[in-house]
Image: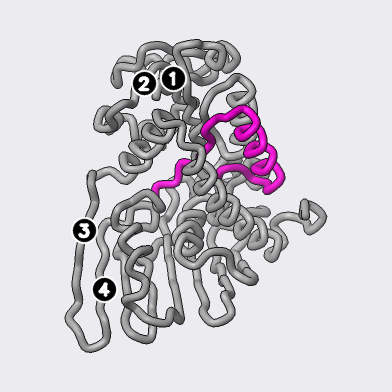
Amino acid sequence: MRLAVLGSGMIVRDFLPHASDVDGLELVAICGRPGSAQRLEQIRSEFGIDRVHTDLDACLADPDIDTVWIAVPNSLHAAYARRALEAGKHVVCEKPFVLDEQELRDLRAMAEDRDLILVEAISTIHLANYRWIQENLHRVGEIRVVQSDYSQFSSRFDRFRSGEVIPAFDPAQGGGALLDIGIYTIHFVVGLLGRPRSVRYTPNVERGVDTSGVLVLDYGDRTAVCVCAKDSDGPIRSKIQGVDGWIAVDGPANAVPQVSSRRRGEQIQTRDLSVHPHRMVEEFRTFVDMVARHDTAARDRLLDHSQAVLAVATAARRSAGLIPTEQDPS
């Protein structure tokens, strides 16, 4: 995979120190706004990236690039992905994939028509510990309750409260707790239980954006509850409760650092199957392999999952009045 990094924010600085641990990943370019040229050059030098682009069209026309990683603000994901696909590039897009279900359907059609890989960069479902949970749900018997909590006080929250317009808390830019850390809890639940019958989101709203909230997913014979917060801290954990036992994760849903489980009448077992200390390495190894093998079947499975998650997030935001009902594309 000959990669161009689009963006230079926190997620980029988080992953790049570990990019060398992904065999087959070549960092060809980093692209950003002209005003960020100095920062881009610093990142290029620090991580051995070959070149800097400050013009997106020039970056997408670069013949040495076959894949782009979109790590720009949420509201730009769809437009950047569309332009990249039009330029014949494979696309890895940060979460939330896009903000509108029709946008994802359109992008998927473009990727299929052009025979390109299009995936959401969501670490949860690629982690070995999470796959163990998927494969061992039967250990808990009939599932009754699933909970996934991710609460983390945002370093930007005080600035937001002072009146500053910040993308992470700007509803016009796809900000808010649910689409930020809450999206990981939805991926966690939907990856285990599939699409729910209905959803209901009850948020705490300030200046039109959800700073925290509780999401209830109804599966008929079982219930899932997701808690997300950027305005307060709390224990971060997920658990699956069944009539015969439980499975629990102490840590965020996007990292799944270890898994504990207990069958009724037995001792607690704790395991850690992680293949790398950093949560994003496993997903990028998967993406490199997908591009190398041109695995469109894997692309389609991942897109099915991402579409289900986006449908839940959209229904949740609509249930709370965060987006108007008339935006429903169905």
Q: Nearer the viewer, mark 4 or mark 1?
A: 4
Secondary structure at numbered mark 3? loop
Which amino acid does the dot numbered 4 rest on? Answer: Ser
Question: Which residue is under mark 1?
Answer: 30
Question: Which residue is under mark 4?
Answer: 261
Which contiguous range is marked in magenta?
96-123
Question: Which residue is under mark 2?
Answer: 27
Label 4, label 2: how many angstroms apart (C-alpha)? Answer: 39 Å
* Residue ID at (22%, 88%): 265
* Residue ID at (33%, 30%): 16
Does the CB distance between marks 4 and 1 fall below 8 Å? no
* Residue ID at (39%, 28%): 292
Does the CB distance between marks 2 and 1 fall below 8 Å? yes
Q: Is residue 73 left or right of residue 3?
A: right
Q: Is residue 38 magenta?
A: no
Which amino acid does the dot numbered 1 rest on? Answer: Ile
Does the CB distance between marks 4 and 2 fall below 8 Å? no
Few, some or many C-alpha atoms within 10 Å of disc 3 (few <14, some 14-19, many ≥20)? few
Does the CB distance between marks 1 and 3 fall below 8 Å? no
